[in-house]
Image: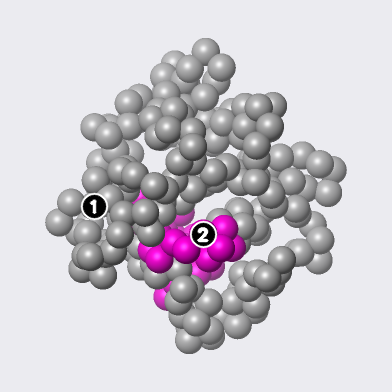
Amino acid sequence: MLLRAFECRPLIEPVALAAAKRLQADAYVRGGHLREGALTREGWLPWHDRSAAHRVRWFGSYDEDGRLVAVATKISGGPLPALHLMGDDRPAALDGCPPERIAEPAGVAKAPDAPRIATLHVYRAMYHDSLRGGDRFWVMSVIPAMRATLERALPGAITVGTRAIRLDGAYPGTHPETLAYPAWGVVGDFTAQLRAAGRDAVADFMDDGIRA
């Protein structure tokens, strides 16, 4: 049922990208992380174009009615905001890794009435994309709610740091109290780590369709 309830795919067309950027911005405002007045006139995040378009891949989950309900981006091929924010918390495993093999899932967001499984579909799509593209590591900055979700849904696959980082200096318009935690994972080890944590069903879900 979970596999049939949502369809996740890359977003390419301008109309789909605009809808994804609005959904993303709405979630940031609704969660109290960003002032509504800080959005662009299109209703997008003020930093939506910080990374060059050719470095950003968008993914979206659609429900059975064809409604876009969850989105995320995967940034690669250059400077990554999450790496900059990590500072001294940068894991030693990243040392010596070519920058082009490190990717940053970012801006994961969902509609208020969408279940969390909709975002897991987005993570699976990015995971498959990373395997096909040769990414070795993921790095992220995750808010406390997303930290809790990752620790429940993907235990062992994603390591979340313990030091909170203020985001207002890096992302214009965010509230001063908005915090995030550095997070990282080895792409090729994701599902093995899930199985080691006893999450075989989640590992099967993440691996489903990987050869497609």
Q: Rounded to the nearest whole Å, what is the CA distance between mark 1 and mark 2? A: 24 Å
Q: Residue at x 33, y 39 (%)?
A: 178
Residue 88: x and y, percent?
Answer: 15, 56
From the image, state whether disc 1 or disc 2 is nearer to you: 2
Indicate the quadrant where residue 18 lies. top right
Please state, as top left, top right, bottom left or bottom right, where the C terminus lies in the image.
bottom right
SS category of the residue bearing label 2: helix
Mark 2 burial class by Cα count in 10 Å: few <14, some 14-19, many 20+: few
Which residue extends farthest top?
A: 41
The residue where tag 2 is placed is: 133
Could you tell me which residue is drawn at 70 percent across and 52 percent down? Answer: 8
**x, y percent for residue 9:** 69, 49
Residue 16 image-quadrant placement: top right
Q: Position of residue 193 (x, y in %)?
A: 46, 80
State the count of labels: 2
Residue drawn at x 30%, y 43% is: 79
Q: Is residue 95 above or below residue 51?
A: below
Q: The disc labelled 2 sits on which kind of residue?
A: Gly
| Residue 86 numbered tag | 1
Q: Which residues are magenta?
A: 128-157
Q: Residues within 10 Å of mark 1 (few under 14, many from 20)?
A: many
Kind of residue indicated by mark 1: Met
